[in-house]
Amino acid sequence: MLARYLLHQLAEKFDNETESRTMSEKVTRTTCPYCGVGCGLVATRDAHGGVVLEGDPEHPANRGQLCSKGAALEQTLDLEGRLLHPMVEGRRTDWDSALDRVAQGFREVIGRHGPDAVAFYLSGQLLTEDYYVANKLMKGYIGSANIDTNSRLCMSSTVVGHKRAFGSDTVPCCYEDLERAKLIVLVGSNAAWCHPILYRRVAQAKQEHPDLHVVVIDPRRTPTCDIADLHLPLRPGSDATLFNGLLVYLERQGERNDPFLEHATEGWYQALNVARATAPSLESVAALCGLAEPVLAEFYRLFARTERVVTLYSQGVNQSSSGSDRVSAILNCHLFTGRVGRPGMGPFSLTGQPNAMGGREVGGLANQLTAHMELADPQHRELVQRFWGSPRMAERPGLMALDLFRAIERGEIKALWIMATNPAVSLPDSNRIHAALRNCSLVVVSDCVADTDTTRFAHVLLPAAAWGEKDGTVTNSERRISRQRRFLPPAGEARPDWWIICEVARRMGFRNGFDYPSGAAIFREYAALSGFENGGERDFDISGLAQLDETEYDRLQPIQWPVYRPGQGTPRMFARGRFFTPSGKARLIPVEPRLPRNIPDQEYPLVLNTGRLRDQWHTMTRTGKAPRLTEHSPEPTALIHPGNARELGIADGLLVTISSRWGEAVVRARISDAQRRGSLFVPMHWNDRFASLGRINAVVNPDSDPLSGQPEFKHTPVRMAVYEPSWHGFLISRQRLDLSTASYWVVAKGDGYYHYEIAGEEPPADWPAWARRLLCSGHGADWVEYLDRSRHCYRGVRMVKGRVESCIFIAPGTELPARSWLAGLFTRETLSDAERRGLLLGKSPAGEREIGHIVCACFSVGVNTLTEAIRSQGLSSVEEIGSLLKAGTGCGSCIPELKALLA
Ligand code: SF4
């Protein structure tokens, strides 16, 4: 209700500001703010001031489809938790004071300690225009390259791999290649959950072309395996050996493309020799990768005999201390066979964030310059400085993310500006990141969210416009630039990031370089720079867009770079076999597979792998607000193989401690034979705002790839043990609560309530008094309670005027009532007598079955409802489930799980 009301107020203000707009202009085409697929959305403001969001049928990335996260965006638009005003040292202030404080703080540090004593840490959530001016300010005006981005955590190994092979950070393929391929190999990618719309395009293509084969290479049997003809559950960290083995196999099978190698590449002989030495035979590769020989042989056969192969890869390849080499090992196989630059083939990296690609393009990484130019290249530095007319230029690459925070820890960087990201959660060894931030004398955070793990360290908070309020461009995984358009006015005093950066720049004395009237003006300058003295030597050239006026910019249609002429994009690169190296030839790189530096031992015998869930995004600041999304996985869990669980005495549903040499976390154990023996999977999303002990990056090791600086999120040696609190429980409340008296708590937002799972090491002396304090018992509340003091069993329900306000259930073990019937009562204003009687039992008096954990987020269909229907109605297909229960007929993200239940 609140969300709708506030949206209504915002919409009225927006209308007043834009009185001349017609009704038809209330329909806005924009792009999804989550993953790198870059789906188009249509936002329609309804007559009541609300917003309806749907997939854009005209956007080439998604053609109208949305995944569960995109489909629930409406639930994230309200103002709950928004940062609405500038704050300095915890007190509200005005924009002038806050901006002056930032500019003065940075000026003072630079004056005393030089330009390398300040840093910016950016985000793939920023728009290209924001990124461009931040990069310009740091590199061309402050004169340091201490500007890095959370894209470092996502795809920087691919950047190194691309540049080594192609001489440029160029993605050769486009999405259409997925429909034209005959073999799609997914490596280290759970696309079904992390890039769902692309996954669905592959699934659809496979349905329409039964001769399309799909191979999944992943230590885990993920939902992506649902469409796989072959799954290779390789040993974690052995990817480079697997692809070196493939290179050797391709040579033996006569698949070497000699004409292409001769005319378009160099280094193939050296790469092959190293592959031969490190992966000499099928048997040795199978042993090193922990795979059955026939399965490996089948994959090699498929790859060798299929001309049109697309290798889709993602964080499972990149997030490694040898990520750059793994990327090179994949690229080598495509170059060796000449399978690049033609329809239906090529290596294809999937980016994690909506504008990770845009950040790479503008030079958001510490070692890059704008428009894919190199900071290490003096000619590029001179060219960019001349184009900008800037007073100086950074002379050497800056510090990459982990090194940057180490420099803060050592006190070398004294002023840090973090924009639109949450490094206190997302960086590995995160307790050390907390210590670094605590130690920094000036922390500025611009964000749209008021309370994150990172904003708690901020001296200055700057309210940034949120997704629906921002105007600019983003680039998706296939190099497609799309417009993100605002359909809501900025909330409170929020301002676009580019405006905030330019205001600080002007106050630092750089008025001339930052006097932009609009985001469109920034884009024009950026586009012009990309073509400036280019002459075809640099891949990134969008000079065909440099003359767009405001209206043309507003109407810009999705287009793939390079763009040399207006309206003419480039779907596929390298069609002529010419690359951006000095010789014009692609390079095959010799790859010597390396084991991770931190390997399991007796003390820490398991390997921790972290990653994304289907319905959550990054640190949950947005998806954590959407009840539809929290229901799929309301609590952080660790997936563990049944064999490991048996050895450790861990039962499904118990709380467990995961410890490493760097830290520990407590999550709930889930036993799964989809997990490879010896390895655990824990989601990356939970943080101190949503769980007391669920921040898994406190456990993750801080090792990184020496070339790309990308951290090793997929391989931390850990141990696991049962966490044994003296009591367990859950509570459901209409209000968000302070749970600091419970040692373990996790909160999930439901529809009109907050659901907490809790546990404690010491039981309170007086349960009813404890519950009353916790649940803020005011006047006029009725309590229904049950207490067995000797067993520490307590149940309490707080009612106000016949409505349930909160309920709490405590027991010594995990045997507690199911939650969904009780949670459903929070949508009701009154209860029947029978329902009141059922309250303390936690059970429906009518004997309704608990629906169980939610599988289909669109229609809230739970696992118990599904299994019951499958059994009792003899359902045997996803279509039959859909017609009976609607599950799977909305966004379709749950289809792999429906198939798993049917199986
Ligand atoms: Fe958004 Fe889902 Fe599309 Fe990714 S696949 S851009 S999360 S709708």
Image: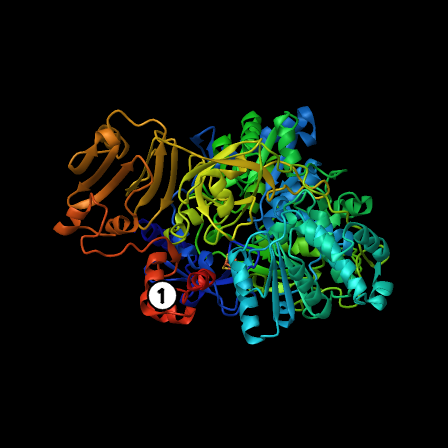
Residue under the image location 70 percent in, 56 percent down? 528
How busy is the neighbourhood of tag 1: few (under 14 within 10 Å), some, or many (20 plus)? some
Give the residue type at disc 1: Ile
- Per the image, label 1 sits on a secondary structure element best described as helix
Residue under the image location 74 percent in, 62 percent down? 334
Above or below — where is 878 with respect to 108? below
Above or below — where is 838 with respect to 23? above
Numbered circles on residues, count? 1
* In the image: residue 301, left or right of residue 8: right
Above or below — where is 459 with respect to 171? above
Residue under the image location 19 percent in, 36 percent down? 786
Question: Where does residue 14 sit, x and y in percent of width and height?
Answer: 41, 54
Question: Where does residue 748 sit, x and y in percent of width and height?
Answer: 37, 45
Mark 1 near ligand 1 (CB under 8 Å)? no
* In the image: residue 381, left or right of residue 508: right
Pick whichever, 424 or 537, lies toward us. 424
* In the image: residue 560, left or right of residue 247: left
Colour setup of the view: rainbow
The answer to whether residue 167 is seen in the rendering is: no
* In the image: residue 125, left or right of residue 391: left
Residue that numbered label 1 is attached to: 870
Question: Where does residue 584 sit, x and y in percent of width and height?
Answer: 84, 59
Question: Where does residue 151 sit, x and y in percent of width and height?
Answer: 61, 46
Residue 347 is drawn in which quadrant? bottom right
Q: Quadrant of the C terminus?
A: bottom left
